[in-house]
Amino acid sequence: MVASGTRIELCGRLADGCGPFVDLLLPADGVPVTGLISILRGRFPALQSALSKGRIRACVNETIVPDEAFVRPDDLVALFPPVSGG
Amino acid sequence: MNSQVELTEDRLDPPARLASFAAMLEDEGAVASFTGRARGKAKDGSLVGALVLETYRGVTLASMQAIVDEAHEKFAISRSHVVHRAGRILPGEPIVFVATASSHRRAAFEAVNYLMDRLKTEAVFWKREEYTGGVYWIEPTVQDQEDTARWLQSEGKENARN
């Protein structure tokens, strides 16, 4: 299994803990969104609280995806805390 | 369907937007509009220096367009215009402008209401209030979620004749 670096963009309040980007090594065949969030919690303790509050959704290649979707190393990945316009 | 959806970092002029919208109308008998403005005080009375709205790539505009498309499916409106600010907004400045037109008034009123409820809870923005002493992220309240949920209880094209 080959691993390579993937940049994860942290949107909104998620950027408060570690800045707007973190880099992770993901398995070549990817991880589900729930697994990605677990990995981030383990690797970045400063994100634990922010990732536990509210519904966090993943956006992969500019599409919001379900929690069971897989994130692969070459994907453009962002994590969204609850959104609010208006 | 005739909709115009826009995201801008420039100052927003709602009267000018409404005039442009009205100038494009044909035989519609109703126009409704809403303007949201940045408040100068937070819920606890603290003075707000600025409201900052963050977006994400093309996803923010796409989320706005999806909401507008669904409003056209749900209500008998012929035309709509939605403009949302992004970036740093000072107290008193408009944040969002929504206008709809329809043959009869009810659809135009309801569609504006629907658009604002869904923009509040589903449009891809992150809002923070900046104070002298720090920042506060604003997320949808329980009331905001309930306001959006009530629209899910009704289906189909509504208010064609009211």
Image (spheres, coloured by chain):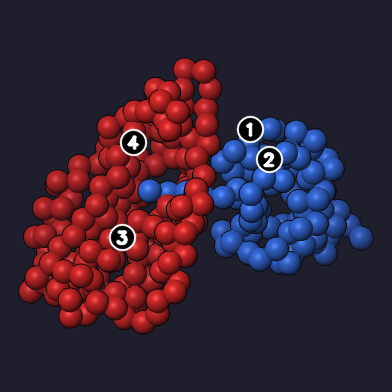
Chain colours: A blue, B red
- Which element is circle 3 on? helix
Q: Earlier in the sequence, mark 4 or mark 3?
A: 4
**In the image, which is nearer the foreground, mark 1 or mark 4?**
4
Q: In this view, does A49 lie above or below B70?
A: above
Residue denoted by label 2: A50
Residue denoted by label 1: A16
Residue A73: image quadrant is bottom right
**In the image, which is nearer the foreground, mark 3 or mark 1?**
3
Q: Is residue B98 above or below residue A14?
A: below
Q: Which of marks 1 and 2 is nearer the N terminus?
A: 1
Q: Are marks 3 and 2 in contact (CB under 8 Å)?
A: no
Residue at 11% over, 72% down = B28
Query: Where residue A67 sits in the image (x, y, percent)?
Result: 70, 63
Residue denoted by label 3: B113
| Measured Cα–Cα span from mark 4 to mark 3 | 18 Å
- Which element is circle 2 on? helix
Q: Are marks 2 and 4 in contact (CB under 8 Å)?
A: no
| Measured Cα–Cα span from mark 3 to mark 2 | 31 Å
The chain holding disc 1 is: A
